[in-house]
Image (tube, grey):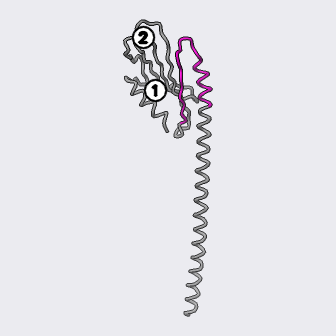
C-alpha cells in the first residue's frame, strides 16, 4: 500500500511539474503576443497621424486659398485618437483700411472629415494697441475671452 501511495504522489508531482512548464511557456507566449500587439497599435496610430497631417494640408489648401487682404494664415492639425478624427486650428490675419483697426485675426477649429467648424473668434487689433474681441463661439455657445476659446480648442487638440 505504501508503494502505491508513493507511486501516486510521484505521479502527481511529475504532472504538476509538467503543468508548471506548460504554464511558464504559455505566460511567455502571452507576453510576446502582448508586445507584438502593442507594436502594431503604435504603428497604426502613427499611420493615422500621418494621414491626418496629409488630409489637413489638402483640406487647408482647398478651404483657405490666399486672399489679397490676408497678411498671414497658418494651421495646426491634430489626430484625436480617442474619437478617431482629425482637427485643424486655423489662424488667419487680415489687413484692414480702417482708421481704428490695424488688422484683425480670425481663429477657428474644424473637424476636417466632417468639414464642420467647432469654434471661431474674431479679434480686432486696434490702432491704440488694444485688442477687441468681436466674435467668439464654441460649438453653439458664446465665449467672452480668448482664454475660453483656447481652453475649448485645447480639449480637441490633445489626446
Quarter occupied by the N terminus: bottom right
Task: Residue at 48% x, 22% y: name it.
Answer: 107
Q: Which mark is residue 52?
A: none
Specify the quadrant of the image occupied by residue 102. top left
User: x and y percent of residue 26 in the render?
Assistant: 60, 65
Task: Residue at 62% x, 40% y: name it.
Answer: 47
Q: Is 77 on the left-hand or right-hand side of 146?
A: right
Residue ID for mark 1: 139
Task: Residue at 61% x, 70% y: name it.
Answer: 22
Residue ID for mark 2: 101
- How many labels, in total? 2
Specify the quadrant of the image occupied by residue 20. bottom right
Secondary structure under the numbered disc 2 in the rendered image: strand
Residue 99 vertical placement versus 54 (above, below) = above
Magenta-colored span: 54-79
Q: CA distance from mark 2 to mark 1?
A: 27 Å
For marks 2 and 1 on the same chain, the one whose residue lies earlier in the sequence: 2
User: x and y percent of residue 18 in the render?
Assistant: 60, 75
Indicate yes or no whether the magenta region holds residue 25. Answer: no
Amino acid at each position: 500500500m505504501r508503494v502505491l501511495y508513493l507511486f501516486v504522489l510521484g505521479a502527481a508531482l511529475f504532472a504538476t511539474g509538467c503543468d508548471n512548464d506548460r504554464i511558464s511557456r504559455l505566460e511567455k507566449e502571452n507576453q510576446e503576443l502582448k508586445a507584438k500587439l502593442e507594436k502594431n497599435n503604435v504603428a497604426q496610430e502613427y499611420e493615422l497621424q500621418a494621414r491626418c497631417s496629409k488630409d489637413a494640408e489638402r483640406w487647408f489648401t482647398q478651404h483657405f486659398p490666399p486672399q489679397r487682404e490676408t497678411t498671414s494664415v497658418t494651421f495646426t492639425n491634430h489626430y484625436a485618437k480617442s474619437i478617431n478624427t482629425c482637427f485643424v486650428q486655423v489662424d488667419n490675419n487680415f489687413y484692414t483700411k480702417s482708421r481704428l483697426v490695424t488688422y484683425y485675426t480670425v481663429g477657428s477649429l474644424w473637424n476636417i472629415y466632417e468639414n464642420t467648424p467647432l469654434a471661431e473668434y474674431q479679434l480686432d487689433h486696434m490702432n491704440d494697441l488694444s485688442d477687441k474681441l468681436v466674435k467668439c463661439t464654441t460649438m453653439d455657445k458664446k465665449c467672452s475671452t480668448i482664454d475660453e476659446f483656447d481652453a475649448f480648442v485645447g480639449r480637441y487638440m490633445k489626446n
